[in-house]
Amino acid sequence: MGKIIMQQFVSLDGVMQAPGDPNEYEYGGWQMPYVGEEHLELIVEQAHAVEALLLGRKTYEGFAASWPSATGMRGLADRMNQMAKFVMSRSLSQAEWNTSIILGEAAEEAVKLKQQLSGDLLVVGSGDLAQTLMKHQLIDEYRLWVHPVILGYGQRLFREGNERAAMRLIDVKTLKSGVVIYTYEPEK
């Protein structure tokens, strides 16, 4: 049985909304100035270390619109296109791009997936799904890529009303761009 790993790109003030999408809101695409070779190398490494992606509908639709035609990026495009994807959605009726739609309750279905797969599931973006998984204490590892920018507003990863959760720091990496990657496990 693998782990559920949540990897999120966040600003210093905790905004996770639209790190690479300039069309989603006023500051969309805020992550792009910090993406370089070192950043890409780690993303590729982490993509190869997991068995599948676990996504919400909105993130899936954004990824599926761009990744299938992507090439290169140190093999990241090939990996993204080959790996299995599971999308949690009550409204999506069809999916392509190596994707299975999961229609049931997200928390219950995530537990089933975790038990069925031998490798890890990686949650990227997927703000509503992330909230559900956190609420049900299903995240085994948090990888927070904190970018040196304050956005002032936008959808945050940790929101008012989230339950208290103690974490144990297991790794820290600082990139030349100023991005700091904090990896935490929930304390049990």
Image (cartoon, helix red, strand yellow):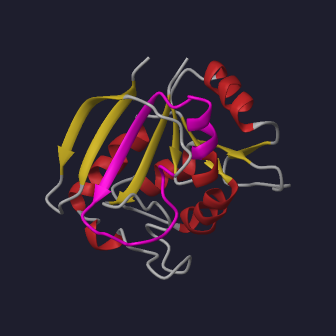
Check the picture and name the quadrant holding the N terminus.
top right
Q: Quadrant of residue 110?
A: top right
- Between 182 and 92, the residue placed more toward the observer is 182
185 part of magenta stretch: no
Q: Is 40 situated left or right of 61 in this image?
A: left
Q: Position of residue 82 (x, y in %)?
A: 56, 46
- Between 47 and 152, the residue placed more toward the observer is 152
Q: Is 174 situated left or right of 66 in this image?
A: left
Q: Residue at x 34, y 33 (%)?
A: 184
Is 115 located above or below residue 141 in the figure? above
153 part of magenta stretch: yes
Q: Quadrant of residue 182?
A: top left
Is 47 located above or below residue 116 in the figure? below
Q: Position of residue 142 (x, y in %)?
A: 41, 37
Q: Is 107 situated left or right of 59 in this image?
A: right
Q: Residue at x 58, y 53 (%)?
A: 126
Q: Residue at x 67, y 54 (%)?
A: 97
Is 102 located above or below residue 41 in the figure? above
Check the picture and name the quadrant holding the C terminus.
top left
Q: Is 125 situated left or right of 89 in this image?
A: left
Q: Position of residue 50 (x, y in %)?
A: 47, 34
Q: Position of residue 22 (x, y in %)?
A: 48, 79
Magenta stretch bounds = 130-159
Identify the residue at the far left of this view: 176
Q: Residue at x 81, y 56 (%)?
A: 92
Q: Number of callouts in the render? A: 0
